[in-house]
Amino acid sequence: MKNLLFYGSTNYGKTLSKSDNLKFIELKRHFNTHVMTLGNNKENIKHDNVQISYLKKPKSLIAQYFYFYFFNFRNFKKYCIKNNIDIVSAKDPIAGFIPILYKKIYNNDIKIIIEHHGDFLDLLLNQRNFKFKFLLKIMAIRISEFTYKSCDFIRGVEKTYTLKLAKKYNKNYHYFPAWVDYTIFEKNNLERNNFLFIGNVIPRKGVDFIIKNFNDFSIKNNFKEKLLIVGENQNSDYFNKCIELVKQNGIKNIEFLGKKSQDEISYLLSSSRLLIMASNYEGLPRVLIESGLCATPSLATDIQGIKEPFGSDGGTLIYELNNSLEFESQLKKFVNNKDLENKLRNKAYSLSTRMSGANSFGNNWFKIMEKLYE
């Protein structure tokens, strides 16, 4: 059985959630699974299904990134030798820098996979404001070129961008969605009344666009059903702007619910008629898979990662990014057509179960291993 190491900055915590544990149970059927990541303290924890090595993270965010991605070579080398690691999956092309160096200097037999969740550079440079962004862009491009050229395999979450990378760097590839817990997100026979947004309240998610246009639609059509906004405040200025939009316009049918647990989100999805998105960038949005598992259709933008496969094969109505007229037109079509709503519910459920049903995540990783050693 091969030893697989996931290398990235995801903090799982000392006690694994039920969802995370299920993911590692699926992987354990095919691998001895390891994780190297950042935590509050330096420690190794051996769970039943995975061994996790935590490196104590520095206080500042920028120091965390630089430490883990560029100054962690000694810890990485030591861990790989001690645990006889065969395959390393780097969370993104920057995280692949140290594994690629290790491969080139010490162990040419180790297999390096670079994961991506859409256009990594676009996401990195636009989700936060950085000083000297142009210098960061140059550095990120050069490192990404180095790691993609030197890796053994590319794993993506959606088809179009994965194929683009594989062709550019002449690499073998496989694509499948990020982990979704199909035991939490499942179809329930609940009364459906509300409309729903789920995601971080940040500019990239277009929450202000949704608020303005859902309110305009409600006024024009005397529409009383609620839009519930579920999401964490990760950008105080933007979050407060969205709150003020609701207050200043006296909007009665939009509510902010804040951050919710996965169980609570599953209930909200199963009791809502429609999930609404206005994202200007996504890789392959996990929320659309979760929504589909709850048989909840969606209304979303025509961007890469949404238009295909959710708009073409699933239960998603598509509108042009930032096009208010199309947004309201599609929303009106949905509200006034119960047959369409039921059809979209069935399509959403069918697509999501194909993408993220039981054992699909573990089996997809097994397929990668087969391709690596064929």
Image: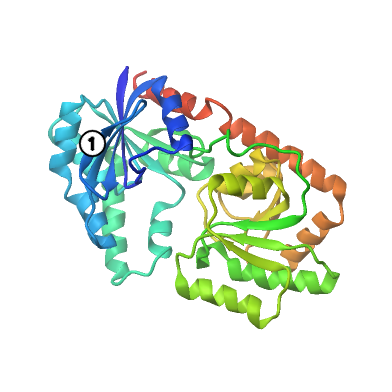
Residue 191: horizontal and vertical position, in percent? 78, 47
Q: x, y (%) of residue 319? A: 69, 59
Q: Is residue 311 visible?
A: no
Occupied quadrant, residue 21:
top left
Write down the quadrant of residue 301 in the picture.
bottom right
Quadrant in the rendering for residue 248 = bottom right
Residue type at numbered disc 1? Asn
Residue 142 image position (x, y, % from top left): 27, 54
In the picture, the quarter occupied by the N terminus is top left
Q: Is residue 232 above or below residue 165?
A: below
> Circle 1 sits in a helix, a strand or a loop, which is it?
strand
Tally of marks:
1
Q: Which residue is mark 1?
A: 44
Left or right position of 47 against 78: right
Residue 156 coordinates in the image, percent (x, y):
45, 40
Residue at 85% from the left image edge and 70% from the top image edge = 222
The residue located at (67%, 73%) in the rendering is 212
- What residue occupies the far bottom of the structure in this picture? 248
Seen in the picture, residue 5 relative to 157 is either above or below; the reply is above
Q: Residue at x 69, y 51 (%)?
A: 298
Q: 184 above or below 268?
A: above
Query: Left or right: 106 with respect to 246?
Result: left
Which is more toward the observer, 170 or 17? 17
Graded by Cα atoms within 10 Å as few (under 14), some (14 to 19) or many (20 or more), the crowding at tag 1 reads some
Q: Residue at x 32, y 46 (%)?
A: 93
- Work out which quarter of the rendered image holds the C terminus and state it: top left
Q: Identify which residue, 368 or 297, lies in the foreground.
A: 297
Q: Is residue 353 left or right of residue 83?
A: right
